[in-house]
Structures are given as structure tokens and as C-alpha cells.
Amino acid sequence: MDKNKDIFGIALKAFYEENDKTAINVHSPDFDDDIIPVEYLFRDFEEMPKVEQTALKRCKGKVLDVGCGAGSHALYLQKNKDLQIHAIDTSQGAVEIAKKRGVESVTHQDFFHIENEKFDTILMLMNGSGIIEKLENLENFFQHSKSLLNEGGKILMDSSDLIYLYEDEIIDPDKYYGEFEYSVSYKEFKADSFNWLYIDPELLMKYAEANGFQCEILEEGENHDYLAALRLKQ
């Protein structure tokens, strides 16, 4: 991977190995620039928001941790001897740091490229719906997830309803208000832009139903975020 592309890997390594607390910058044509404090990516269970804590408590059996980052969720789950954890991330640097922190099973892999494996829980946190990128990809996401779930398995995914950002604005009828384009940078490094999806719970339920899943909202957070459990209909 081009070093310029692996922003999270560079930042995680600098923090873990050198205690460099330089933040990751987030850019979007729709909003002012924002930051991600790198130390937040190393948080422990007590520092996690309620939706994440609830998701971790609901994990069962063989768990796939999608977008594991520095491995904070996987490390917590490893303490539960009844679980078998496998973590993945598209950042090679993040995978290396997760290994150094003690994550026992972690690979550099894209969720949509996993084949011939089955899980009881697919865990997708920190706006897990983001990797779907656009509404038009939701059907593919559900169909691919079906191929990865054991009978009785579930997806635990968090997202946010961002309608509150548009209270005084006219929403573009040709574009879903939860679809965004972002890019990230860190010091002199900058990655290509990417698409990211936030989805409101009502629309998630609609798409789940259309693709053979049941959707249950397990937790609502303080910042318009929520946790959903998606189970295959029996």
C-alpha cells in the first residue's frame, strides 16, 4: 500500500510507538474540517460509548470484527473465553499495531472479499455502516453478509441519523442525506477521497426487510447514533 494512503496506520503507529498525539484530519466538501484524536482509537471498554459497550456484550460464538483499527474491541472480546475473535482492517498499519497490542487473530482484509468463512456475529462499530459507502450498495452488503453468517447469526452495526444537520436546509431529493464524501490527512500524508454511509434506522429496517433480515434497534446513543442487530429471517 502507498504510504500516503494508509493514514490511520501511520497515525496509530506514531501514537503507539512514539506517543505522538497528532490528530488525524477529516475533510469533506459538505462540512468544515474535523479531527479524530488518535488516542481515542486506543480506548478501553470504560471509555467506549454505550452503543459500543452494548454491542460487545451481545457478541456470541465466532466473531468477525470489521474495521478493527488498533484492536480495542477485539482485545476486550478476547477476554471472554466463550468467544472466538477474528479481526480485519483495510489498513496494513492498523493490523500491525493490533497485533502488537495483543490481538491474536487479525488480517489485512476487505470485508467484501471474504469467502468460505462463517461467523456467528459480524461486528461493525464506529459507524459500521460507513463501509457500505452508498445506499445503492446495501443489497450487495446484505447478500454478502448472508454468505458469512452461520444459522442464527447476526450483524451488530452502529450508525447515525444525520437528519438533524439539515434542520434549516433543503435536502437534495436526488441524494440521500446520509451519503458523504471524505478524505483524511495526517501531517504531510493525505489519502484519496472515499464514500461513507450513515443510515437512519427506519431506512435500515426497510432495506433489511427487503433482503431477508430482521432489524432490531438495541440501543440509542446521545448523539443521534444507534446500535442495530440484523438477523436472517428464519
Image (cartoon, helix red, strand yellow):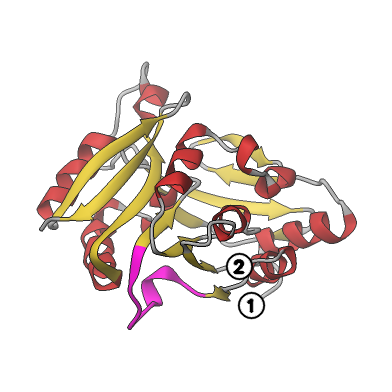
- The residue located at (72%, 66%) in the rendering is 97
Q: Which numbered marker is on residue 91?
A: 2
Q: Amino acid at mark 1?
A: Met
Q: In this figure, which residue is indicated by the disc labeled 1? A: 1
- The residue located at (71%, 41%) in the rendering is 37
The label nearer to you, 2 versus 1, is 2
Of residues 112 and 222, which is closer to you in this image?
222
Quadrant for residue 55, please give it: top left
The extreme bottom residue here reads 116
Q: Relative to 187, say whether 96 is above or below.
A: below
- The residue located at (30%, 24%) in the rendering is 170
Q: Relative to 163, say whether 134 is above or below.
A: below
Q: Which label's residue is closer to the chain start, 2 or 1?
A: 1
- The residue located at (63%, 36%) in the rendering is 46
User: What quarter of the picture does the N terminus occupy?
Assistant: bottom right
Bounds of the magenta segment? 109-120
Residue 178 placement, left or right of 49: left
Of residues 213 and 169, which is closer to you in this image?
213
Q: Amino acid at mark 2?
A: Ser
User: What quarter of the picture does the C terminus occupy?
Assistant: bottom left
x and y, in percent, of residue 139 in the image: 21, 60
